[in-house]
Image: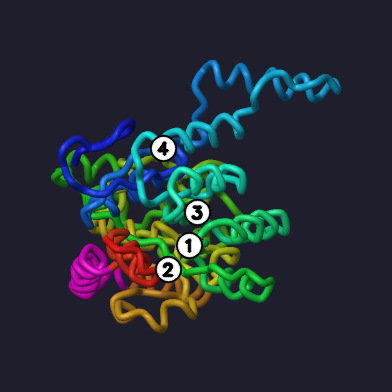
Amino acid sequence: MKRVLEGPAGGTGKKLVTVEGPIAANKWTWVVESGLYSIGLESVIHFHDSPEPLSRISNQMHNLLKRFGLPGTFVDWKTMSNHRLRDMVNKNKTPLVISLQGMIDKKTVEDIRGLNPIIRIIYWWGPPVRREDQILRIMEVDGFVDILALSFEKDVQLLRSRGAKRIAHMPFASCPYHHKLKLKVTSRSRRRYGREVMLIAPHGEYEEELVCRTSEVLGRKVDVWGPGWSDNQWVKHNGLIFPPRNLEAYATSSIVLNLHGKDFAEHNGLNPAFFEIPAAGGFQITEEQPVLDDQPFFPLVATFGDSRELAEKVRYYLHDQGAREDMRSRLQAHILEKETYGQRFYDLFRSMEFSL
């Protein structure tokens, strides 16, 4: 796949999208770019969380002067980032801007619309909306963009009740280019990353309770990757793991525990891993949620309601490899074909009457 980070895509004849996104965040920017590419749109990317060295120095000096009550003679990174975004839109003449939880503000949008009055601007807030300051930021953005996309249904309802007008539901999805395992599964990769029962998550009381209960029922430790864990009677800590190695762990393990946690579940939405695990070829067990009941793939998802049921489901699917493999392969095929970022954006563009 061609990657265009600066300047227009020469000679393709395809529309360009300016994407403002984070450089990390589980490759969010990259999977969005790939989703757009899959429906015929190439992107130019501005990373809003990766200042150049001189920009970092300028930002530090600006904040230092402000701390001592002196006039800020340096441009802070937020201002500089928005200037770069505006210049990139002007340079590439893009008809669409997608800001992934970026620093875009009203003044920048006004400048961009001055360059192109018919440009469309989408702002996507990815994680659950947890705090009042996040609500205030989202309400602010709602006042100057064309579409405000939220990943969780309950947050859509909350912001509408607060008066937001431009909200659309934009769930997470899979990206066949990034999430389908490209490497061949080998005996070496199985030894290195494959586990019978595995969890990738930071430590938390909720996660530890479920892991310990499962380990106790199985009579052996559950393997865990992530920060904050330590080995104990019921937990085997494997250290940290990062993309794309997590895809190898998904594909080579018998069962992957995907714990949304109470926070995610209360917002009635599915985390990114819900789509990444089956896309990579893994079999997951996750919490029951209302959002799952209405999905066409619901019969292909193993769920649990409490720690006791989780332990029983793990024991059952470890024993019944045939049932596990049938659900795994059918869900993978569905996710890679129907639940993709390309399809999400295609549906969103149609709803906002943005011509491809």
Q: Amino acid at mark 4?
A: Asn
Q: Secondary structure at mark 1?
A: loop
Residue contact between numbered discs 4 and 3, judged by CB atoms under 8 Å: no
Please tell me in which quadrant of the rendered image residue 329 appears: bottom left
Determine if residue 283 is in view: no
Residue 24 x, y percent position in the rendering: 44, 38
Upstream in the sequence, badge 3 or badge 2?
3
Amino acid at pointer 1: Leu
Q: Which residue is mark 1?
A: 259
Asked if the residue at tag 2 contacts the one at tag 4, i.e. Cβ–Cβ closer than 8 Å, the answer is: no
Report which residue position mark 4 lands on.
Answer: 90
- Spatial CA span between label 4 and label 3: 57 Å
Mark earlier in primary sequence (4, 2): 4
Q: Which residue is mark 3?
A: 234
- Is residue 256 visible to us here? yes
Residue 210 in percent (x, y) is at 52, 63
The residue at 40%/47% (across/down) is 28
Amino acid type, label 3: Trp
Q: Tell me the crowding category of disc 1: few under 14, some 14 to 19, or many 20 or more residues within 10 angstroms, Cα based.
A: many
Q: Position of residue 306 (x, y in %)?
A: 53, 74
Question: Residue 352 in magenta?
Answer: no
Magenta span: 317-338
Which tag is nearer the camera, tag 1 or tag 3? 1
Q: Are marks 2 and 1 in contact (CB under 8 Å)?
A: yes
